[in-house]
């Protein structure tokens, strides 16, 4: 499942439930939208190590 942190904007994938963001360690995470999941997938395919994407940024 793909998640998004509402505090820092970090996008990440995990199998199973998650209680906090692996980047900022805050508990304000939610399931990523389809658009966010697509952006993360594109970044992973490109091998980009900076996976933090803010809503106003484009690829």
Image: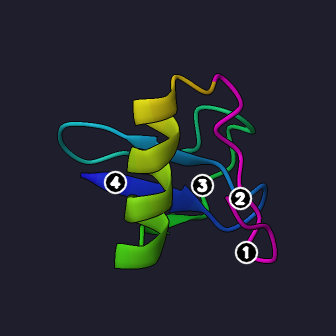
Q: What SS does tag 1 mark?
A: loop
Q: Look at the numbered discs 4 and 3 and tell me whether their residues touch, using CB distance below 8 Å.
A: no
- Residue 53: x %, y % from top left: 71, 55
Instruction: Please report the residue visible at 77 percent of the width from the left and 64 percent of the height from the top.
Output: 54
Q: CA distance from mark 3 to mark 2?
A: 12 Å
Among numbered discs 4 and 3, the one appearing first in the sequence? 4
Q: Which residue is mark 1?
A: 55
Q: Disc 1 vs disc 2: Cβ atoms closer than 8 Å?
A: yes
- Give percent across and percent down for residue 3: 42, 56
- Spatial distance from mark 1 to mark 4, Cα to Cα? 16 Å
Name the one closer to the observer, 41 or 3: 41
**Label 4 vs 2, first from the N-terminus:** 4
Mark 4 lies on residue: 2
- From mark 3 to mark 1, how far is it between C-alphas? 19 Å
Q: Are marks 1 and 4 in contact (CB under 8 Å)?
A: no
Q: CA distance from mark 4 to mark 3?
A: 15 Å
The residue located at (67%, 68%) in the rendering is: 6
């Amino acid at each position: 499942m793909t998640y998004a942190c509402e505090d820092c904007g970090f996008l990440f994938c995990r199998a199973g439930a998650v209680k906090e963001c692996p980047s900022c360690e805050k508990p304000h995470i939610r399931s990523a939208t389809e658009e966010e999941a697509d952006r993360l997938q594109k970044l992973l395919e490109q091998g980009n190590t900076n996976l933090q994407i803010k809503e106003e940024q484009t690829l």
